[in-house]
Amino acid sequence: MSLEERRKKDSKESSSEEKNKALNLVLGQIERNFGRGSIMRLGDASRMKVETISTGALTLDLALGGGYPKGRVVEVYGPESSGKTTLTLHAIAEVQKNGGIAAFVDAEHALDPVYAASLGVDVENLLVSQPDTGEMALEIVDQLIRSTAVDLVVVDSVAALTPRAEIEGEMGDHVIGSQARLMSQAMRKITGNIGKSGCTVIFLNQLRLKIGVTYGNPETTTGGNALKFYASVRLDIRRIQTLKRGTEEYGIRAKVKVAKNKVAPPFRIAEFDILFGKGISTTGCLLDLAEETNIIIRRGAWYSYEGENIGQGRDNTIIWLDQNLEIKNKVESIVKTKLTEGTEVSSNSMKALNNNPENDVIANNIKKIA
C-alpha cells in the first residue's frame, strides 16, 4: 500500500470516528432533553414485533394476523345489532384472562353488566366511565393511556361523543363540524402516547348515509376522517344471517371485513356465530376451521371425525364437541398446528394472498394463538 493510499484510509477512519462521536453526543443530548427511548436505532427497538390481543374468535384472529395489535388504534364499525359491542367485550375478557386491566368508556350509557359477565368479563375489576361530554370522555381516555397501567380501552361509541358546545346549546342549534374537530384534536393528542404505553384503544362507530350519493357506497362513519387515518385496523362487521331453531331465533351469523390493516395484509374476511346471551361461539369457529382443513369431514348433513359420524347438522355437531372436551381439545390442537404450518382457509381469504410475502408475518403471529 502506498503512502498516499494509507493517508486516505486513515483520513476516512478518523472522519468516521468523528461522525460516530458527534452522533453519540447528539443522541445523548436528545435522550437527556426528551427522555430515554425518544430516539433509537430501529435494530435496537424492543417492540419491532407487534404483539396482539385475541379477539375471542379464532377465524377473526387469523384474518387480523393474530388479533388486535397492541399500542395501536382500532375502529370497529357497522349497522345496529351487528355485534360491535359483543366483539369488544370478548377482547376485554381476553385481556383480563391474561392478567391485564381494561377500561370501558360508555358514552352511549348502554353497557349491560349482566351480559358482559356472561361473556367472561370480570365486571368487578372492569373500569367503567359514563362521561357527560365528548371532551370529558376523550380526556379520560388520554389519562388512562398516559398511566401505562391499562392494557385496553374501549370507547362506545364515537357517535355518542357529543361536544360540550352542542350539549350546552339549544336543541336544533347547528354546530357544524364540532365532533370532527374534537376527534381530530383527540387523535393528534393521544396517538403518540398509545404507542409508548402499549395500550390498545378500540373505538366503536356507527354508520350514516351520505345524502345525494348516486354512485358508489353511500355509507360513512361518524366523527370525520381523522379516525380513519389514525386507526391501524378498521373492521367492518355485518349481520349476514339470523340463526334459528324452528321459529326460535337464538343468534346471528356475523361477517367481518378487515377494511384496513397496517400490521398485516388487509381485506381478509372472517365469519363466526354470535349466540344471544352467550357471545361468540368459539366451538363454531373451531368447527368451521376443522371442516376447511379436512380434520372434520362433512358429507351432506353429517359431520364425521376419524371415520365416525359425530353429529347430524352443524348445531348438533357443536353440541357434541362441547360435550366431548377431550376430542374437542385434540381437534383444536391439530387445527392450530395446521394453521401454523400455513394451511390455507378460504374463510379468511388466505388463498387470495398466497403469494404475498407478508404472510410470513401472519404465520409468526398465528404461532402465538397455538
Image (tube, grey):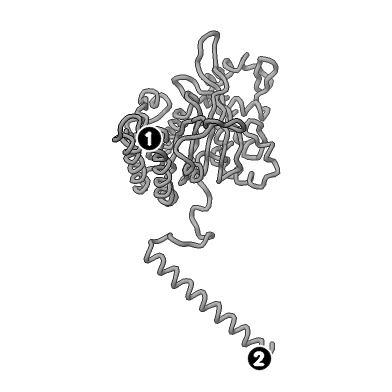
Residue 236 x, y percent position in the rendering = 54, 33
Which residue is label 1 attached to?
A: 174
Q: Residue at x 44, y 38 (%)?
A: 223
Quadrant where the N terminus sits is bottom right
Q: Is residue 350 above or below residue 44?
A: above
Left or right relative to 213: residue 192: left
In the foreground, 364 or 229: 229
Is residue 184 left or right of 338 when viewed as pictured?
left
Does dot 2 land on a helix, a strand or a loop?
Answer: helix
Farthest residue, direction left: 168
Q: Residue at x 65, y 22 (%)?
A: 305
**Residue 151 image-quadrant placement:** top left
Q: Is residue 290 above or below residue 21?
A: above
Other residues around mark 1 within 10 Å, as few (<14) / some (14–19) / many (≥20) = few
Label 2 amino acid? Leu
On residue 2, the disc is: none
Of 315 and 28, the residue lying toward us: 28
At x 53% / y 35%, what residue is drawn?
235
Which residue is denoted by mark 2 in the rendering?
A: 3
Crowding near the residue tagged with mark 2, few <14, some 14–19, many ≥20 C-alpha atoms within 10 Å:
few
In front of the other: label 1 or label 2? 1
Secondary structure under tag 1 reads: loop
Q: Quadrant of residue 13?
A: bottom right
Q: In x, y percent, where is residue 247?
A: 53, 8
Alpha carbon distance from label 1 to label 2: 81 Å
Q: Quadrant of residue 257?
A: top right
| Amino acid type, callout 1 | His
* N-term-proximal mark, 1 vs 2: 2
Q: Nearer the viewer, residue 357 or 30?
A: 30
Tell me if residue 83 comes above or below residue 202 in the rendering: above
